Image: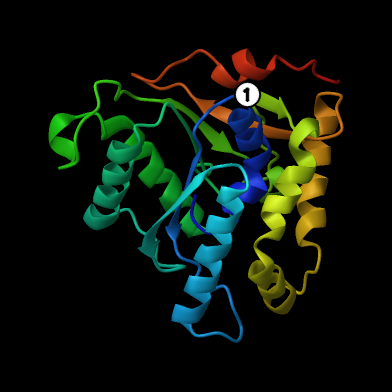
Amino acid sequence: MAHPDDAEFLCAGTLIRLADTGWNIHICTVANGDCGTTSETPWAIAGIRTAEAERAARQIGGVYHCLGERDGMVVYDHGSIQKSLDLFRRVTPALVFIHPAKDYMMDHEMSSLLGRAASFLFGAPNASAFPLSPKAKPPHLYYCDPVEARDPYGNTVVPTTYVDIVPSLERKAEMLACHASQREWLRAYHGEDEYLQSMRRLAAMRGAEIGTAAAEAFVQHRGHAYPRNDLLQELFGKPTMVV
Protein backbone atom coordinates (compact mmCIF):
# COMPACT_ATOMS: atom_id res chain seq x y z
CA MET A 1 0.00 0.00 0.00
CA ALA A 2 1.00 3.66 -0.24
CA HIS A 3 0.62 4.97 3.33
CA PRO A 4 0.27 3.78 6.90
CA ASP A 5 -3.45 3.00 7.46
CA ASP A 6 -4.29 2.21 3.80
CA ALA A 7 -4.22 -1.55 4.35
CA GLU A 8 -6.24 -1.25 7.54
CA PHE A 9 -8.88 0.79 5.73
CA LEU A 10 -9.11 -1.27 2.53
CA CYS A 11 -8.29 -4.92 3.20
CA ALA A 12 -7.68 -5.57 6.90
CA GLY A 13 -10.92 -7.50 7.27
CA THR A 14 -9.64 -10.00 4.73
CA LEU A 15 -6.14 -9.99 6.23
CA ILE A 16 -7.63 -10.88 9.61
CA ARG A 17 -9.58 -13.77 8.14
CA LEU A 18 -6.43 -15.00 6.40
CA ALA A 19 -4.40 -14.73 9.60
CA ASP A 20 -7.08 -16.69 11.45
CA THR A 21 -6.65 -19.55 8.97
CA GLY A 22 -2.88 -19.67 9.38
CA TRP A 23 -1.53 -17.28 6.77
CA ASN A 24 1.58 -15.22 7.57
CA ILE A 25 0.69 -11.55 7.07
CA HIS A 26 3.03 -8.81 5.88
CA ILE A 27 1.85 -5.21 5.49
CA CYS A 28 4.05 -2.84 3.49
CA THR A 29 3.72 0.86 2.82
CA VAL A 30 5.82 2.61 0.21
CA ALA A 31 5.66 5.98 2.01
CA ASN A 32 6.28 6.75 5.67
CA GLY A 33 3.44 9.22 6.28
CA ASP A 34 5.67 12.26 6.72
CA CYS A 35 3.08 14.70 5.34
CA GLY A 36 0.15 13.41 7.40
CA THR A 37 0.20 16.22 9.94
CA THR A 38 -0.50 19.90 10.49
CA SER A 39 1.73 20.27 13.53
CA GLU A 40 4.62 17.76 13.66
CA THR A 41 7.94 17.81 11.81
CA PRO A 42 8.31 15.33 8.92
CA TRP A 43 10.64 13.15 10.99
CA ALA A 44 8.42 13.13 14.04
CA ILE A 45 5.21 12.27 12.22
CA ALA A 46 6.94 9.61 10.11
CA GLY A 47 8.08 7.93 13.32
CA ILE A 48 4.60 8.20 14.84
CA ARG A 49 2.81 6.84 11.79
CA THR A 50 5.14 3.92 11.14
CA ALA A 51 4.91 2.99 14.83
CA GLU A 52 1.12 3.05 14.53
CA ALA A 53 1.31 0.81 11.47
CA GLU A 54 3.61 -1.62 13.26
CA ARG A 55 1.24 -1.76 16.22
CA ALA A 56 -1.73 -2.45 13.95
CA ALA A 57 0.08 -5.28 12.15
CA ARG A 58 1.08 -6.86 15.46
CA GLN A 59 -2.59 -7.14 16.43
CA ILE A 60 -2.96 -9.97 13.91
CA GLY A 61 0.55 -11.38 14.29
CA GLY A 62 1.69 -9.57 11.15
CA VAL A 63 4.94 -7.85 10.19
CA TYR A 64 5.07 -4.24 9.00
CA HIS A 65 7.53 -2.99 6.37
CA CYS A 66 8.10 0.55 5.08
CA LEU A 67 10.08 1.39 1.93
CA GLY A 68 10.77 4.88 3.29
CA GLU A 69 9.55 7.12 0.48
CA ARG A 70 7.99 10.51 1.23
CA ASP A 71 4.28 11.25 1.03
CA GLY A 72 3.33 12.74 -2.31
CA MET A 73 6.69 11.75 -3.80
CA VAL A 74 6.01 8.11 -4.61
CA VAL A 75 7.22 7.41 -8.14
CA TYR A 76 7.74 4.42 -10.37
CA ASP A 77 11.50 4.66 -10.79
CA HIS A 78 14.60 2.46 -10.53
CA GLY A 79 15.11 2.90 -6.80
CA SER A 80 11.51 2.30 -5.80
CA ILE A 81 11.18 -0.70 -8.09
CA GLN A 82 14.32 -2.24 -6.60
CA LYS A 83 13.11 -1.71 -3.03
CA SER A 84 9.84 -3.40 -3.96
CA LEU A 85 11.60 -6.31 -5.66
CA ASP A 86 13.90 -6.80 -2.68
CA LEU A 87 10.95 -6.91 -0.28
CA PHE A 88 9.05 -9.42 -2.40
CA ARG A 89 12.20 -11.52 -2.69
CA ARG A 90 12.53 -11.61 1.11
CA VAL A 91 8.85 -12.41 1.72
CA THR A 92 8.00 -14.59 -1.33
CA PRO A 93 4.29 -13.74 -1.22
CA ALA A 94 1.63 -16.11 -2.52
CA LEU A 95 -1.21 -13.56 -2.27
CA VAL A 96 -0.87 -9.80 -2.73
CA PHE A 97 -3.26 -6.86 -2.31
CA ILE A 98 -2.46 -3.51 -3.95
CA HIS A 99 -4.22 -0.24 -4.65
CA PRO A 100 -6.39 -0.03 -7.78
CA ALA A 101 -4.61 1.07 -10.93
CA LYS A 102 -6.71 4.26 -10.99
CA ASP A 103 -7.35 6.04 -7.71
CA TYR A 104 -7.94 9.50 -6.28
CA MET A 105 -4.27 10.22 -5.56
CA MET A 106 -1.05 9.48 -7.41
CA ASP A 107 0.78 7.88 -4.46
CA HIS A 108 -1.84 5.12 -4.63
CA GLU A 109 -1.46 4.67 -8.37
CA MET A 110 2.34 4.60 -8.22
CA SER A 111 2.29 2.13 -5.31
CA SER A 112 -0.06 -0.05 -7.36
CA LEU A 113 2.44 -0.05 -10.22
CA LEU A 114 5.28 -0.92 -7.86
CA GLY A 115 3.37 -3.83 -6.34
CA ARG A 116 2.32 -5.12 -9.71
CA ALA A 117 5.85 -4.88 -11.10
CA ALA A 118 7.40 -6.62 -8.11
CA SER A 119 4.81 -9.39 -8.15
CA PHE A 120 5.70 -10.23 -11.74
CA LEU A 121 9.49 -9.90 -11.63
CA PHE A 122 10.65 -10.90 -8.15
CA GLY A 123 11.07 -14.53 -9.19
CA ALA A 124 13.59 -13.65 -11.91
CA PRO A 125 17.04 -14.68 -10.58
CA ASN A 126 18.74 -11.43 -11.60
CA ALA A 127 16.03 -9.11 -10.25
CA SER A 128 17.43 -8.90 -6.71
CA ALA A 129 20.54 -9.78 -4.74
CA PHE A 130 18.41 -11.44 -2.06
CA PRO A 131 18.20 -15.25 -2.15
CA LEU A 132 15.62 -16.71 -4.50
CA SER A 133 13.08 -19.13 -3.04
CA PRO A 134 12.11 -22.11 -5.19
CA LYS A 135 8.50 -21.12 -4.42
CA ALA A 136 8.87 -17.71 -6.09
CA LYS A 137 6.28 -17.20 -8.83
CA PRO A 138 3.62 -14.63 -9.71
CA PRO A 139 1.17 -14.62 -6.78
CA HIS A 140 -2.57 -14.24 -6.72
CA LEU A 141 -2.94 -10.48 -7.10
CA TYR A 142 -5.98 -8.40 -6.14
CA TYR A 143 -6.72 -4.69 -6.44
CA CYS A 144 -8.44 -3.22 -3.38
CA ASP A 145 -11.38 -0.86 -3.64
CA PRO A 146 -10.57 2.81 -4.04
CA VAL A 147 -11.90 5.01 -1.25
CA GLU A 148 -15.69 5.32 -1.68
CA ALA A 149 -15.40 2.50 -4.27
CA ARG A 150 -15.21 5.09 -7.06
CA ASP A 151 -12.54 5.63 -9.70
CA PRO A 152 -11.16 9.13 -10.40
CA TYR A 153 -14.00 9.76 -12.86
CA GLY A 154 -16.74 9.03 -10.31
CA ASN A 155 -17.65 5.57 -11.60
CA THR A 156 -18.36 2.83 -9.07
CA VAL A 157 -15.82 0.00 -9.40
CA VAL A 158 -17.34 -3.37 -10.28
CA PRO A 159 -15.66 -6.09 -8.16
CA THR A 160 -14.75 -9.58 -9.28
CA THR A 161 -14.54 -10.80 -5.68
CA TYR A 162 -16.16 -10.11 -2.32
CA VAL A 163 -15.08 -11.26 1.12
CA ASP A 164 -17.62 -11.26 3.95
CA ILE A 165 -15.89 -9.46 6.83
CA VAL A 166 -18.66 -9.62 9.41
CA PRO A 167 -16.48 -12.03 11.47
CA SER A 168 -13.57 -9.57 11.42
CA LEU A 169 -15.15 -6.11 11.22
CA GLU A 170 -14.60 -5.10 14.85
CA ARG A 171 -10.99 -6.24 14.78
CA LYS A 172 -10.52 -4.31 11.54
CA ALA A 173 -11.85 -1.23 13.34
CA GLU A 174 -9.38 -1.84 16.17
CA MET A 175 -6.49 -2.02 13.67
CA LEU A 176 -7.62 1.19 11.98
CA ALA A 177 -7.99 2.91 15.36
CA CYS A 178 -4.26 2.35 15.94
CA HIS A 179 -3.72 5.19 13.45
CA ALA A 180 -4.80 7.93 15.84
CA SER A 181 -2.58 10.54 14.20
CA GLN A 182 -4.31 10.07 10.85
CA ARG A 183 -7.70 10.74 12.37
CA GLU A 184 -6.41 14.10 13.63
CA TRP A 185 -4.86 14.88 10.23
CA LEU A 186 -8.10 14.19 8.37
CA ARG A 187 -10.04 16.30 10.84
CA ALA A 188 -7.65 19.25 10.37
CA TYR A 189 -6.92 18.98 6.63
CA HIS A 190 -10.14 17.55 5.16
CA GLY A 191 -12.59 18.79 7.75
CA GLU A 192 -13.69 15.22 8.50
CA ASP A 193 -14.07 13.50 11.83
CA GLU A 194 -15.47 10.18 10.73
CA TYR A 195 -12.40 8.05 10.19
CA LEU A 196 -13.89 4.80 11.46
CA GLN A 197 -17.40 5.63 10.29
CA SER A 198 -16.31 6.05 6.67
CA MET A 199 -14.64 2.63 6.79
CA ARG A 200 -17.84 1.12 8.17
CA ARG A 201 -19.94 2.82 5.47
CA LEU A 202 -17.82 1.34 2.69
CA ALA A 203 -17.95 -2.10 4.31
CA ALA A 204 -21.73 -1.82 4.68
CA MET A 205 -22.17 -0.69 1.06
CA ARG A 206 -20.18 -3.63 -0.28
CA GLY A 207 -21.88 -5.95 2.17
CA ALA A 208 -25.33 -4.92 0.97
CA GLU A 209 -24.35 -5.97 -2.55
CA ILE A 210 -23.96 -9.57 -1.39
CA GLY A 211 -26.57 -9.67 1.33
CA THR A 212 -24.35 -9.37 4.39
CA ALA A 213 -23.67 -6.60 6.89
CA ALA A 214 -20.05 -5.92 5.89
CA ALA A 215 -17.72 -6.93 3.07
CA GLU A 216 -14.52 -5.97 1.29
CA ALA A 217 -14.43 -5.97 -2.49
CA PHE A 218 -11.58 -6.64 -4.89
CA VAL A 219 -10.77 -6.88 -8.59
CA GLN A 220 -8.52 -9.81 -9.42
CA HIS A 221 -5.56 -9.33 -11.75
CA ARG A 222 -5.71 -12.19 -14.27
CA GLY A 223 -3.10 -11.16 -16.81
CA HIS A 224 -0.57 -13.45 -18.47
CA ALA A 225 1.46 -15.59 -16.02
CA TYR A 226 -0.81 -14.83 -13.04
CA PRO A 227 -3.12 -17.40 -11.44
CA ARG A 228 -6.67 -17.04 -12.74
CA ASN A 229 -8.52 -19.07 -10.15
CA ASP A 230 -10.17 -16.87 -7.52
CA LEU A 231 -8.26 -17.87 -4.39
CA LEU A 232 -10.29 -15.65 -2.07
CA GLN A 233 -13.51 -17.21 -3.30
CA GLU A 234 -12.08 -20.67 -2.76
CA LEU A 235 -10.99 -19.77 0.77
CA PHE A 236 -14.08 -17.91 1.94
CA GLY A 237 -16.89 -18.96 -0.39
CA LYS A 238 -18.69 -17.30 -3.24
CA PRO A 239 -21.28 -14.76 -2.06
CA THR A 240 -24.77 -14.58 -3.46
CA MET A 241 -25.22 -11.31 -5.31
CA VAL A 242 -28.19 -9.13 -4.38
CA VAL A 243 -29.89 -7.55 -7.37
Q: Which residue is mark 1?
A: 160
| Image coordinates for residue 147, horizontal then vertical, percent | 67, 50
The one nearer the camera, 143 or 133, is: 133
Label total for image: 1
Q: What x and y, as percent, mark residue 220?
A: 53, 26
| Residue 152 makes an appearance in the image | no
Residue 232 placement, left or right of 43: right
Snapshot quadrant of residue 138: top left
Q: Is residue 234 above or below residue 223?
A: above
Residue 131 locus on image (x, y percent): 19, 35
Left or right of 31, for residue 121: left
What residue appears at the point 48 percent right and 72 percent down from the top-left corner?
A: 46
Q: Is residue 20 left or right of residue 91?
A: right
Dot 1 alpha-carbon crowd within 10 angstroms: few under 14, some 14 to 19, many 20 or more = some
The local secondary structure at tag 1 comes to: loop
Q: Is residue 167 visible?
A: yes
- Name which residue type carries label 1: Thr
* Rendered position, 41 above or below 212: below
Q: Quadrant of the C terminus?
A: top right
* Residue 126 sits above or below residue 32 on the image: above
User: Residue 37, image x and y in percent?
Assistant: 59, 78
- Work out whether residue 39 or residue 111 is closer to the camera in this orientation and state it: 39
Left or right relative to 69: residue 47: right
Name which residue lies at 68% across and 67% down: 180
Q: Could you tell me which residue is drawn at 61 percent across and 42 percent down? A: 60
